[in-house]
Amino acid sequence: MTSPRTRPWPVDLEGLGYGGDYNPEQWPVQTQLEDVELMQQAGVNIVSVGIFSWAMLEPREGEYDFDWLDAVLDRLHAAGIRVALATATASPPPWLTRYHPEILPELADGTVLGQGGRQAYSVSSPVFRDYALRMTRTMAERYADHPALALWHVDNELGCHVPHDFSQDAAVAFRRWLEARYGTVEALNAAWGTAFWSQRYDTFDEVLPPRTAPTYANPTQQLDFARYSSDELLTHYRALRDVLREVTPQVPTTTNLMASTGTKWMDYFSWADDLDVVANDHYTRAHDPAAHIELAFSADLTRGIAGGDPWILMEHSTSAVNWQPRNRTKAPGEMLRHSLSHVARGADSVMFFQWRQSAAGAEKFHSAMLPHAGTDTDVWRNTLTLGQALKALAPVRGSRVQADVAILFDYPAWWGTELDSHPSQDVTYVDQVTAWYRQLWHRGVTADIVSPREDLSSYRLVIVPTLYLVTDDGAARVAAAAAAGATVLVTYFSGIVDEHDRVRLGGYPGAFRELLGVRTEEFYALQAGERLTLDDGATADLWSEKTHLVGAEAMSTYTDGLLAGWPAVTRHAVGTGHAWYVGTRLDEVGASRLADTLLLESGVQPVVDAVPEGVEVVRRRGGEVGGGADASFLFVLNHTPEEAVVTARGVDLLTGTAADGEVRVAPHGVAVVQES
Ligand code: GLA
């Protein structure tokens, strides 16, 4: 289990949160009145307001129009609906970029990103920061005592469209960040290896963001720029948050993250301590036939970021989105199942983008809780059904998910793995991580997705997929887990470099060599389509290594190619545990067999015996509202077209039906059994 930071969902709602982004400024007052009535019908108890309202609230510099927002908040309050109020700073109004074009962000090739979409600001611009702080203070002071105010929502999806800014302001801020990190330019030169290619810097003033260059930019410069960029977005959050804390110390603050397999550039593990509650936005991908597994990964990652605490699902979609090449409408039952999968994995609130589907603007074809076609629709009926379900699940609030398996996940390792000029461009980080996640998902085994900065001592199985970059501390935590009795799996191209992207000399996998009892002398990256066979009948592709055994035993060896006879998979006894190394990408047969072996060796069990294929089973325990510390909730989400039968004893909170030894879940249906 990850270490609790005791950061429960801080809003004084009775049960789980339910609602979405609410953008009333797009509608006449008559429609806004109807909104509140329909929200009450649906059981909505919290909405996010004002995210993109700056231009409506401050139509001209220094001239404010708050009347409409006052009325909205009063109306919501009268209806008993709480508000996550935004700082309204997510998109600067046109007058601001007109008078201060210097706040616009720049791409690596010098392209300046213009006004007309959203998020057209450089996060490092002191001018923009001043305006954003002023708007934040104005909002905070105006609504400090408003009884609807439950939570502050800072900006929106920080870094979503502009994770990296290469502008002049960014160059200045990057240099400041580097000076704080290295102290002297000599230390920077040593860390970046600037003796190579005549890159030595004489002063920090010579250093630039890694703008488009004739060939590969210095890899450590790229890595540090990624770190700086994530830190700079967090710095912006902190600056706004500090104003909110000063004016309204009693109100919790957050911002919506985008933790998923698709968001690479924000190191959310390092953001978590600054959020009073972790909030996440998640959207499934139309082209992914296993989108529900990617969703589960995102939810488990969000829980990992939250240190195991309950978190808020701040946005997802009731049906299709508008920003994918071909946007998929959700099938019957899918919206409820997806929502409850987030809840099963720790969400104490389910919210959407957005309440009412827009009639105009870039997102008019994005689904909402209330669609263009009105209330006589599948989408609206789904909105009502989910509202009822969440009400019935009130006892779940505050309960926690427990896992015996940790999968290590690290943003700097992701950035490092995918730097240019590597042995193979085909080694992509998330694919390695999710391959092992899927093995567990299909077996009904819950995993925590945790940072190498976490203590791993409570896990029985620790999976370390392609952790190219690892600090000494991170490697030591993995080794300590094995020494204390865990089974550890490390996969190829791990432990290669330190935090400065400097190779750990003496043979690969550098930082894990001793733990694994192996020494690789050379990589043999495979060509597209090239496949090797192993002596246990599995095959492998993508990658192979010439690995010597230094204490480990070979569990399988290559039977063909240049490495015939050399180990592919090894196992090393360490303390009371074992450390396995997989020096290649195993096919499904090999990976599946290895997953079974690791679970058996570590004694890790699925959530219930015999989880049917395609059925998701997760347990939350404890809670603030229901049965207290002993309460236990079994979520069963049936993603298949067949009825699912799962062992359970208790009462299904959604139907009130007793489960006397088993629960039967309809095709594509859900059950949440409060276990007795
Ligand atoms: C993000 C944003 C929302 C909206 C949705 C669309 O989550 O925060 O404003 O654009 O995407 O999916």
Image (cartoon, rainbow, N blue to C red):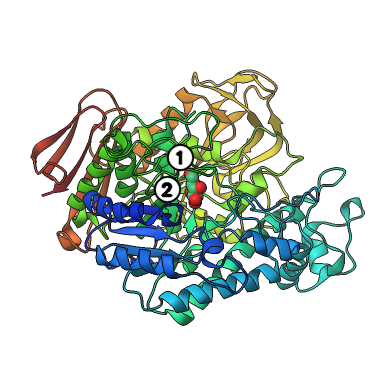
Q: Position of residue 38 (x, y in %)?
A: 26, 50
Sequence-wise first label, 1 or 2: 2
Q: Does the beta carbon at disc 1 come under 8 Å from ligand 1?
A: yes
Q: Is residue 659 above or below residue 394?
A: above
CB of mark 1 within 8 Å of CB of mark 2? yes
Q: Quadrant of residue 524?
A: top right
Q: Does the beta carbon at disc 2 come under 8 Å from ligand 1?
A: yes
Q: Residues within 10 Å of mark 2 (few under 14, many from 20)?
A: many
Residue 606 visible, this orientation: no
Q: Residue at x 69, y 61 (%)?
A: 97
Q: Quadrant of residue 472?
A: bottom right
Q: Is residue 247 above or below residue 667?
A: below
Between residue 603 and residue 413, name the one nearer to us: 413
Q: Residues within 10 Å of mark 1 (few under 14, many from 20)?
A: some
Q: Position of residue 667 (x, y in %)?
A: 23, 27
Amino acid, disc 2: Phe
Name the residue beneath numbered marker 2. 353
Q: Position of residue 512 (x, y in %)?
A: 59, 49
Numbered circle sitting on residue 366: 1
Numbered circle sitting on residue 210: none
Q: Residue at x 33, y 65 (%)?
A: 8
